[in-house]
């Protein structure tokens, strides 16, 4: 996408290296707050009502709220999240990965505030209690969908026992999101749409449409045909010393007209060899 390329040339130097590491650090801080000061967590949620009443830190603090999981799978989840994050960053680049993650956070915050404003405009009532539906869970879901698109055949050990490829886990994540969208309330649906919109923007803006052009298809067909040909086969070989064209770029080979049969010689043995007669 030309717009992203221009933005990267202009602001790429400000991109945060290894952003996943810092996000995991926020999660660790969130877990510490959750276990040591559980009452503080309610002051971190993305609650538009309280934001409009001066608690503006909620626009950022909600990313501290970690995904709910047991302590047994906590370390495994963080390691998996780090692996997925750095893998995507290496493929799409640090700047685009920053845009993806920060864009997902901004889209979620904007969607929450927009839902609050639209509801107040339609009903004239203040919408309270939707902050709990906005978390990084759906952003992480979109991140895994991106990983499944980029690395569909990477294999995970589900529950440390069941081998499953990333593409099938991505499909399961998508089905779960669809089920949550159908069964959830309006706030949850908006949160899911915000995360999926972030994934679709990434997918459409980074997709290489030249791969489906006729010229590119022909190039790939020619390449596959060349790869099917036997490797290591030579066109010329000296009947005396056995050297081939691979032994030197300056070697020349000729057939001898006096030998009975198809015998080829290099320039050193073309005039010094003993002619072969079938009789």
Image (tube, grey):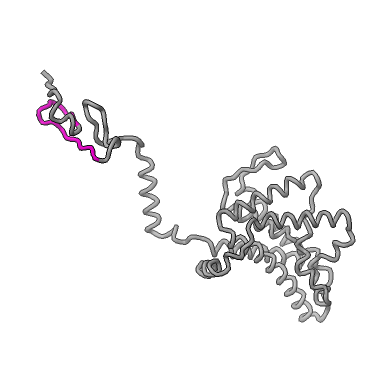
Picture quarter containing residue 225?
top left
Considering every residue shown, the one lying at the far top of the view is 279
* Residue 264 magenta-highlighted: yes
Above-or-below relation of 231 to 84: above
Picture quarter containing residue 269?
top left
| Left or right for 277, reference 186 | left
| Left or right for 61, reference 218 | right
What residue is drawn where x is 27% and y is 33%? 244
Count of labels in the image = 0
* Residue 256 magenta-highlighted: yes
| Left or right for 131, reference 198 | right
What residue is drawn where x is 57% and y is 45%? 153
Magenta stretch, main secondary structure class: loop
Nearest the viewer among 270 and 194 is 270
Image spot of residue 173 (x, y percent): 67, 53
Nearest the viewer among 272 and 277 is 272
| Left or right for 105, reference 34 | left
What residue is drawn where x is 79% and y is 70%? 57
Image spot of residue 120 (x, y percent): 79, 79
User: Can you say which quadrant of the picture contains the C terminus?
Assistant: top left
Image spot of residue 144 (x, y percent): 65, 54
Image spot of residue 73 (x, y percent): 77, 45
What residue is drawn where x is 55% and y is 66%? 8
Nearest the viewer among 33 and 261 is 33
Nearest the viewer among 182 and 151 is 151
Q: Which residues are magenta?
A: 250-265
């Amino acid at each position: 996408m030309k717009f992203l390329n221009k933005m990267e040339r202009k602001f790429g130097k400000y991109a945060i290296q290894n952003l996943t590491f810092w996000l995991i650090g926020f999660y660790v801080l969130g877990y510490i707050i959750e276990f040591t000061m559980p009452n503080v967590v309610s002051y971190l949620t993305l609650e538009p009502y309280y934001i409009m009443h001066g608690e503006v830190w909620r626009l950022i603090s909600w990313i501290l709220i970690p995904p709910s999981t047991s302590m047994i799978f906590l370390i495994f989840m963080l390691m998996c999240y780090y692996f997925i994050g750095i893998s995507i960053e290496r493929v799409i680049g640090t700047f685009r990965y920053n845009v993806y993650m920060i864009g997902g956070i901004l889209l979620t915050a904007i969607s929450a505030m927009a839902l609050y404003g639209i509801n107040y405009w339609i009903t004239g009532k203040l919408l309270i209690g939707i902050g709990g539906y906005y978390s990084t869970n759906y952003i992480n879901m979109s991140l895994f969908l991106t990983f499944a698109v980029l690395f569909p055949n990477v294999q995970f050990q589900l529950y440390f026992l069941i081998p499953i490829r990333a593409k099938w886990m991505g499909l399961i994540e998508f089905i779960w999101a669809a089920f949550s969208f159908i069964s959830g309330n309006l706030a949850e649906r908006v949160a899911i749409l915000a995360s999926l919109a972030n994934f679709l923007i990434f997918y459409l803006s980074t997709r290489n449409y030249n791969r489906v052009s006729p010229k590119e298809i022909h190039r790939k067909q020619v390449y596959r045909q060349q790869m099917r040909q036997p490797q290591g086969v030579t066109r010329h070989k000296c009947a005396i010393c056995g050297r081939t064209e691979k032994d030197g770029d300056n070697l020349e080979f000729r057939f001898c007209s006096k030998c009975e049969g198809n015998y080829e010689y290099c320039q050193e043995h073309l005039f010094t060899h003993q002619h072969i007669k079938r009789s």
